[in-house]
Structures are given as C-alpha cells and as structure tokens.
C-alpha cells in the first residue's frame, strides 16, 4: 500500500516517490530541473498533465531528500553509461564514423 510522503507525493511499496494521480516519479521531474535548468513553470509547460502544485511538491520532496535522490540519479546515470558501452555503436553511428562524420 502506498503511503503519503508529502502533499501530492506518495511512496510505493519500494519507497519510490510518485506524484499523486499522475503516474510520474518525483525523480523524473527532478531530472528535468537538473538537466535542463527548467523552472516549475517550464516543467508545467513541458508536462501539462502535472499541476504547478504537483511540480512544486515534487521539488520540495527532492530538497527534503536530496542526498538520497542525487545518489539514485548518479546510480541510474552509471547504469545507462554501462549499458551504452556494452551495446556499442549503433549501425548508423558506425556508418557515420566510417565516413568521418562522427569522432
């Protein structure tokens, strides 16, 4: 059963924070903020299904749990890098490199 963590934020059975009634993880909003420098208003423009109240709640939850969420973001980033390394170049990237169009 999910438990209320903050207004508009619920934790699932694994402790993952989700925005209530939106099927969006808090960490997804946080990554938009960190990666693109988007304001809450810009996040709302990009994700119109989220209210500004939900976005602000997600960011408040992040700042209350910043160390934990930053560690999870770093872990996910490392996993993505490792998977990309293991997958190697796509056929398109290989052709572009062969033509000298990619480093």
Image (cartoon, rainbow, N blue to C red):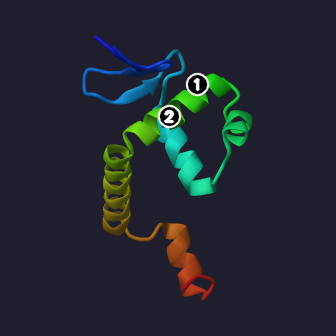
The residue tagged 2 is 60
Residue 92: percent from left, percent from top:
55, 69
Q: In percent of the image, x 28 and y 28: which residue is there?
A: 15
For residue 8, above or below residue 25: above
Q: Left or right: where does residue 80 sit relative to residue 31? A: left
Q: Residue furthest left?
A: 14
Badge 1, how many Cα within 10 Å: few under 14, some, many 20+? many
Q: Residue furthest bottom?
A: 100
Q: Is residue 50 visible?
A: no
Q: Is residue 10 visible?
A: yes
Badge 2, how many Cα within 10 Å: few under 14, some, many 20+? some
Q: Nearer the viewer, residue 99 or 42?
A: 42
Quadrant in the picture for residue 14: top left
Residue 32: percent from left, percent from top:
57, 47
Name the quarter where the N terminus is drawn: top left
- Residue 54 — which label? 1
For residue 4, above or below residue 55: above
Name the quarter where the C terminus is drawn: bottom right
Residue 59: percent from left, percent from top:
52, 37
Asked whether the beta carbons under mark 2 and mark 1 sit within 8 Å of each other, the answer is no
In primary-sequence order, the first of circles 2 and 1 is: 1
Residue at mark 2 to residue at mark 1: CA–CA distance: 10 Å
Residue 27: percent from left, percent from top:
45, 40
Q: Left or right: where does residue 67 sit relative to residue 51? A: left
Q: In percent of the image, x 67 and y 27: which residue is there?
A: 52
Q: Depth-wise, is mark 2 or mark 1 nearer the camera?
A: 2
Q: In percent of the image, x 71 and y 28: which residue is there?
A: 48
| Circle 2: element type | helix
Q: Residue furthest front?
A: 64
| Circle 1: element type | helix
Q: In percent of the image, x 63 and y 84: which residue is there?
A: 101
Quadrant in the picture for residue 36: bottom right
């Amino acid at each position: 059963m999910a438990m209320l963590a903050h207004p508009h934020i619920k934790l699932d059975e694994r402790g993952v924070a989700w925005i209530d009634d939106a099927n969006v993880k808090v960490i997804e909003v946080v990554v938009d903020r960190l990666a693109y420098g988007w304001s809450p208003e810009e996040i709302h423009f990009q994700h119109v299904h989220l209210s500004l109240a939900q976005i602000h709640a997600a960011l408040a939850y992040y700042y209350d749990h910043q160390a934990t969420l930053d560690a999870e973001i770093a872990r996910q980033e490392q996993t993505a890098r490792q998977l990309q390394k293991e997958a190697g170049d796509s056929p398109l990237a290989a052709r572009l490199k062969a033509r000298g169009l990619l480093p």
